[in-house]
Amino acid sequence: MTDLRTHVRSVLTLALPLILAEVGWMFMAVVDTIMVGHLPHPAITISAVALAQVLYNTLAFGIGGILFGLDTYLSQSHGAGELDEANRWLLHGVVLAAILSAILMAIVHAASFALLHFPVDPVIRTQAIAFLRVLNTGSPALMLALTLRRYLQAFNQVKAIAITAVTANLVNAALDWLFLFPHQWASFSLPGYGVVGAAISTSLARLYMVLFFVAAIWYFDRKHNYGLRRISRRIEAARLRELALFGAPVGGQIFVEISIFGAVTWIIGTFGPLPLAGHEIALNVASITFMVPFAISAAASVRVGQAIGRKAPSDASAAGYTAIAMGAAFMLCASATLVAIPHAIARGFTLDPGVIAAAVPLLLVAAAFQFFDGVQITASGALRGAGITHIGLIVHLCGYWVIGMPVGLLLGFHYKMGAVGLWIGLCAGLIVAASALLRSWQITSRAIGARLLASSPHCSIADI
């Protein structure tokens, strides 16, 4: 077994560009929030974007999370040196992404009509619906980007992902400036589309990401002769079904985790524009910090999967534990930052004193659950690399909905703590999830070696 420093270095090598990519991915939403926060009536505009984004993200990443099952298939195939098999999985991932795109667009469009009946300020509701419908046009690009980046990271080509994310943010910021605010040039003018302009820019930035990923995959295939251009284009229904069924618990886990934040967002929306705007700022900040362990989680999935593919159980175990420790350590630093400068962080989004006052208490609650959030997501990634996708779904259902939501409702309404009480409920759910998933990884890491020895050389992922 290689020493600890080697494992830290290997995880960091993969994780650092992914961290840049994940933070960059999330920063698109943050930039949108900041930009709409400088439109007239920021409490209204931020609230509208909050409602639309949380509804879209809950559906999009719940459905798109099915594609995360590719992490296991691609990384284990790469670790075993079976490049043709990895290429076949990519092809079926693209087909599945197209199917999921159609499903997502239909559901989001239907949800926009349901939003008409949500009990919130009519101005907020109108702007949220317009934002949601435009954002939905970028759904095919989002699903395809999720698929293509899984191939790149499984083949350790993570710098391309980071470059894509950084440049896509520059594209998004420039388009936000172009479409949100009115502009007048010599013989040409743009009227300014308000919050809808942010949805236009995000959709176009996601299309840019897809084009960049395609170019990167084409380049690396020619450079390293992965054989992607030579694979059979025949679609196997059995393989497509296997990928969908294997990834479904991953999508379910992501849906459960995001939907609890979505439900809290909608409940806080009934409290009025100021609490909702404060919640959106705190949620954006918590989402940014979460992207770092989320990227480490992706690295853990790849490293664990590659180690299993090359029949190295001790390396798989060490990779998982290293990732969990790194994710927890970063989140402790994030917690200290949130405690130290919550007002300064809130002022980065808006200068409205009412919105800042609503955001600061929630940022302090977010500081309390940072550590547990880091542990649970990195443990989930390690389990996914080992081919175990169902445990996370069960744990998140129990942690968030059986424990977290009732605690939040009790504190928020019975004890009159409002948005802060609901966030404390989220904190309780994360503590339960982190404890259960860490224990699950401990059990799994001990079992990997025995299962590899008992399996045939041609065992399937389900056997592991």
Image (cartoon, helix red, strand yellow):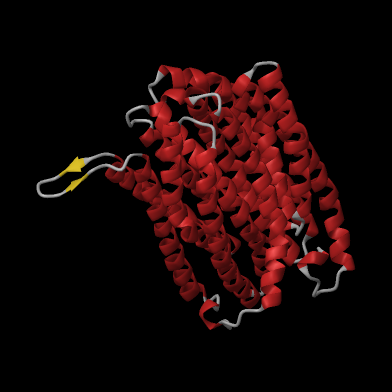
Residue 460 locus on image (x, y percent) = 78, 70
Q: Would residue 2 be visible to someone looking at this image? A: no
Pick whichever, 303 or 414, lies toward us: 414
As drawn, 201 above or below 118: below
Pick whichever, 90 or 138, lies toward us: 138
Residue 233 locus on image (x, y percent) = 56, 82
Residue 107 locus on image (x, y percent) = 56, 54
Q: Residue at x 55, y 69 (%)?
A: 94
On the rendered image, what quadrant is the C terminus found in?
bottom right
As drawn, 218 above or below 422: below
> Number of marks in the image?
0
Pick whichever, 436 or 426, lies toward us: 426
Q: Is residue 50 left or right of residue 77?
A: left
Residue 159 locus on image (x, y percent) = 48, 56
- Quadrant assignment, res 347: top left
**Farthest front residue in view:** 117
Q: Residue at x 42, y 67 (%)?
A: 215
On the rendered image, what quadrant is the N terminus found in?
bottom right
Q: Is residue 34 left or right of residue 397?
A: left
Q: Would residue 336 be visible to someone looking at this image? A: yes
As drawn, 64 above or below 39: below
Q: Residue at x 57, y 33 (%)?
A: 265
Q: Is residue 25 left or right of residue 40?
A: right
